[in-house]
Amino acid sequence: MDANAMTRAWAAFEREDWTQAEALYREILGDTALTSAEQQEARFCLGYVLAHADHFNEAREIFASLRQEAATRGDLAFEHVALHQVGMVERMAGHWQAAQDCFERERELIVRLGNADLAVAVNAYELGTAAQHLGQQAEAKAWLDLSLTCAERTDDLIAVGCAHRGLGDWSSAQGQLSEALSCWRSAHASFLAAEDNRAASDVERRLSAKSANLRPAR
């Protein structure tokens, strides 16, 4: 496989040129000399691109197929990663019950794999987000608290930022604006430290929108 082709395809994804990224990954997958590992990587990346381009059906099919192949060969580690992506697709499509079901099944695999802190943190964040959208507020808070606890035991600042952002969203939904702002500020700091400017900007929009509610009237 041409390593430069993969670099170009990922660069297109990062600049959100979904059409170009999709075309490049499909071109890569047309290479009959790909190893099975290279094909798996390219399919995974294509699924990610398709999800962000709102082509949810094909993205779901790709990740479900990768998950089934991993299950067949007994690769629990990759099965949990692929299943997480199926849940991501359902979340992005707004199918919250389906997303929750996927992340609950992923949780079972994570337990079997030893409950690594980062895996638990990322999964718990997704479970908390899904629960909140399904109106399960107590469950959402418990999952998001677990996400933050586990994320802070890792060196993954993005996971820490996501957990703080989720807790900020939860607090905002409960009308707890001061707590929401505090959580979002922590999220913003984590994302900046991780140099994830897109996530930092997303939190800045939350802070800007809600900070006005706490300013005294003139």
Image (cartoon, rainbow, N blue to C red):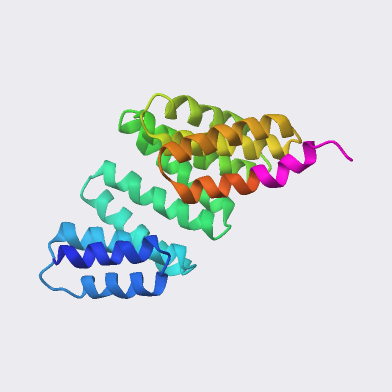
The one nearer the camera, 167 or 3, is: 3
Q: Is residue 100 visible?
A: no
Residue 153, percent from left and from top = 39, 24
The one nearer the camera, 138 or 183, is: 183
Q: Quadrant of residue 164?
A: top right
Q: Quadrant of residue 51?
A: bottom left
Residue 132, percent from left and from top = 63, 41
Residue 191, percent from left and from top = 47, 40
> Left or right: 164 with respect to 123?
right
> Left or right: 214 with respect to 197?
right
> Left or right: 206 with respect to 62?
right
- Determine the residue positioned at 72% across, 42% down: 210
- Determine the residue positioned at 42% across, 62% down: 60
Magenta region, residue range: 207-218
Kindly give the residue lying farthest to the left in the view shown: 33
- Determine the residue positioned at 46% across, 51% down: 87
Q: Is residue 212 magenta?
A: yes
Residue 38, percent from left and from top = 18, 60
- Determine the residue positioned at 40% across, 52% down: 85
Q: Is residue 178 visible?
A: yes
Q: Quadrant of residue 112?
A: top left
Give the vertical position of 214 relative to 63 (above or below): above
Q: Is residue 147 magenta?
A: no
Quadrant of the drawing holding the C terminus = top right
Please tell me whether the stretch drawn in magenta is mainly helix, strand or loop: helix
Quadrant of the drawing holding the N terminus = bottom left
